[in-house]
């Protein structure tokens, strides 16, 4: 797997960032609202009690859950993203505990959480980092806590290089040390790209991915294949 990852803080600062063969000048996951799969989970009552969000980025998922009346702590490693998320919360009068933290240790993350959300963060970790991260999540959650993960599969590697293995066997192996998977399926993850923007920004091999494993949703967002995982704290 490639060890070339994007400079997330630079991207949040508005700079163009190279990711593999792609030059990004937009934040691919910025929807200025929650990820539709997160809305689907919330509508199904999948988040209860205190909630921890990993890799919260600009905070749109966390703010959405706070609007639903949930107690939210959300962290990211990019200081620029956390600063913007805090500003959004203040502007909207919402209470979210946004923090800067290392996912592999969760140092500074206080509380015992009943639910956890990872919306497209875990695939940014190496296999070793992922195991540390899943152990750290186990340490800060309550018995029976529910973990929801959205994680890009290996077929997206040509577009967004990932440092770890995200095939089903590797994910089941690492999650199984601390979590019991009760649902794992392939879904569609909404991006900030329209079909036209996608075609202009991506290399030729991206066209095949879009036509076979992705779609454009009702809002015009290109969707990428993503693992949707539900797991219970062991």
Image (tube, rainbow, N blue to C red):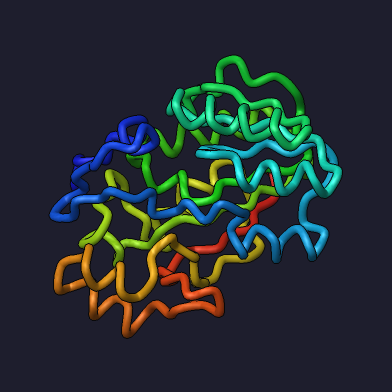
Q: Looking at the picture, how far across and down is residue 146, in whole percent?
A: 72, 48
Residue at point 61% right, 46% down? 60
Please name whichever residue, 126 or 124, is drawn nearer the observer in this view of the structure: 124
Left or right of 4? Residue 104 is right
Q: Looking at the picture, how far across and down is residue 81, in whole percent?
A: 48, 32
Residue 1 visible? The answer is no
Residue 35 visible? The answer is yes
Q: Is residue 208 above or below residue 157?
A: below
Residue at point 70% right, 50% down? 232
Q: Looking at the picture, how far across and down is residue 79, in whole percent?
A: 45, 23
Q: Furthest residue to the top?
A: 108
Q: Quadrant of residue 85?
A: top right
Please name whichever residue, 144 or 69, is drawn nearer the observer in this view of the structure: 69
How many numbered circles are shown?
0
Residue at point 82% right, 59% down? 45
**Looking at the figure, which quarter contains the C terminus?**
top right
Q: Looking at the picture, how far across and down is residue 202, in whole percent?
A: 21, 65
Q: Is residue 19 above or below residue 194?
A: above
Q: Is residue 75 above or below residue 222?
A: above
Please name whichever residue, 79 or 88, is drawn nearer the observer in this view of the structure: 88
Residue at point 43% right, 28% down? 78
Please name whichever residue, 192 or 133, is drawn nearer the observer in this view of the structure: 192
Left or right of 178? Residue 172 is left
């Amino acid at each position: 797997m490639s060890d070339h990852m994007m400079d997330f803080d630079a991207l949040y600062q508005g700079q163009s960032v190279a990711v593999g063969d792609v030059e990004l000048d937009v934040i691919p996951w910025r929807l200025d609202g929650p990820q539709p799969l997160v809305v689907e989970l919330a509508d199904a009552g999948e988040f209860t009690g205190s909630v921890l969000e990993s890799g919260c980025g600009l905070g749109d998922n966390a703010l959405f859950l706070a609007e639903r009346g949930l107690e939210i702590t959300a962290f990211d490693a990019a200081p620029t993203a956390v600063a913007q998320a805090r500003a959004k919360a203040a502007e909207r009068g919402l209470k979210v505990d946004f923090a800067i933290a290392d996912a592999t240790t969760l140092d500074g993350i206080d509380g015992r959480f009943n639910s956890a959300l990872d919306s497209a963060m875990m695939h940014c970790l190496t296999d070793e980092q992922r195991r540390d991260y899943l152990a750290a999540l186990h340490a800060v959650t309550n018995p029976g806590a529910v973990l929801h993960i959205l994680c890009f599969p290996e077929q997206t590697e040509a577009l967004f290089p990932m440092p770890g293995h995200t095939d089903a066997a590797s994910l089941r192996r690492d999650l199984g040390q601390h979590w019991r998977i009760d649902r794992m399926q392939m879904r569609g993850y909404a991006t900030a790209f329209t079909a036209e923007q996608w075609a202009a920004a991506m290399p030729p091999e991206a066209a095949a991915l879009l036509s076979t494993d992705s779609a454009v949703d009702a809002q015009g967002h290109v969707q990428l294949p993503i693992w949707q995982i539900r797991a219970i704290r062991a």
